């Protein structure tokens, strides 16, 4: 089965929708975004999340102490970094909390650029996106073929993933696909779209483990 993350939850209904659908991960966005949540709001939403769904905190150049506080309160079980966080930042974060780290690859535009710092930063996972998270835009996925030999960690694929192309996205071999706007109607999460996306992911064979 393919793995799937539904990102950008900020309403009680969103929690109900994912509990019904059962994705592998969900995301709470703590960076500036239409989907941004406060620590208090995320804590309240997290309390209603079904067991077995991993809550991920999404950050851009956040204070490490803020991430540690959310982890200590049980709000998040993984962290996704979309800013200029480097090897020293990730090392310091890991010294203070036992969180798996997903690091978004810098770049964007027509194709992602995998730089030495991305490989050496010490993240547990990489994430390839078109640029600004949650934009709903996809990059040219064929560009990933040229990067396969350089990718040394399991990776997430985000940007423009919908029910129409999720099978193609999973066929590229990501550890997990990350969906935000593709699970929405009118800027808010759509129960039927979430259920369909999760169902389609489960019907797709998982990539071979590295």
Image (cartoon, rainbow, N blue to C red):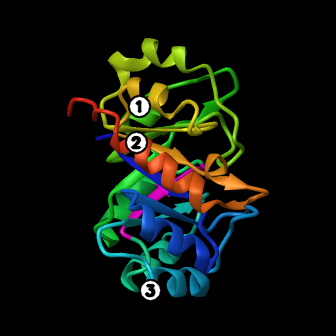
Count neighbours of disc 1 (C-alpha within 10 A) and say few if under 14, some if 14 to 19, many if 20 or more.
many
Question: Does the magenta run of residues contain 6?
Answer: no
The label nearer to you, 1 versus 2, is: 2
Q: Residue 47: which disc?
A: 3
Q: Is residue 86 visible?
A: no
Of the 4 image quadrants, the one containing the N terminus is top left
Count neighbours of disc 2 (C-alpha within 10 A) and say few if under 14, some if 14 to 19, many if 20 or more.
many
Name the secondary structure under disc 1.
helix
Q: Is residue 114 visible?
A: yes
Residue 106 picture quarter: top right
- Name the residue beneath numbered marker 2: 201
Kindly identify the residue that appears in the image at 68 percent across and 20 percent down: 110
Q: Residue 170: which disc?
A: 1
Q: Where residue 197 sits: x, y (%)?
A: 50, 46
Of the 4 image quadrants, the one containing the C terminus is top left
Q: Where residue 207 sits: x, y (%)?
A: 28, 31
Chain-order first, disc 1 or disc 2: 1
């Amino acid at each position: 089965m393919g793995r799937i993350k539904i990102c950008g939850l900020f309403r009680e209904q969103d929690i109900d929708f994912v509990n019904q659908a059962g994705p592998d991960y969900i995301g709470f966005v703590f960076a500036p975004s239409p989907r941004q949540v406060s620590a208090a709001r995320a804590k309240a939403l997290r309390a209603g999340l079904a067991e077995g769904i991993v809550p991920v905190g999404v950050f851009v150049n956040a204070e490490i102490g803020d991430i540690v506080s959310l982890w200590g309160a049980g709000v998040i079980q993984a962290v996704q970094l979309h800013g200029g966080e480097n090897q020293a930042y990730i090392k310091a974060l890991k010294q203070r909390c036992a969180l798996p780290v997903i690091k978004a690859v810098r770049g964007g535009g027509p194709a992602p650029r995998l730089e030495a710092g991305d490989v050496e930063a010490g993240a547990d996972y990489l994430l390839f996106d078109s640029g600004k998270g949650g934009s709903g835009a996809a990059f040219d996925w064929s560009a990933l073929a040229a990067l396969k030999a350089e990718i040394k960690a399991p990776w997430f694929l985000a940007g423009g993933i919908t029910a129409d192309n999720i099978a193609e996205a999973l066929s590229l071999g990501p550890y997990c696909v990350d969906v935000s706007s593709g699970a929405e109607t009118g800027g808010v999460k759509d129960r039927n779209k979430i259920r369909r996306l999760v169902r389609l992911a489960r019907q797709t064979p998982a990539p071979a483990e590295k």
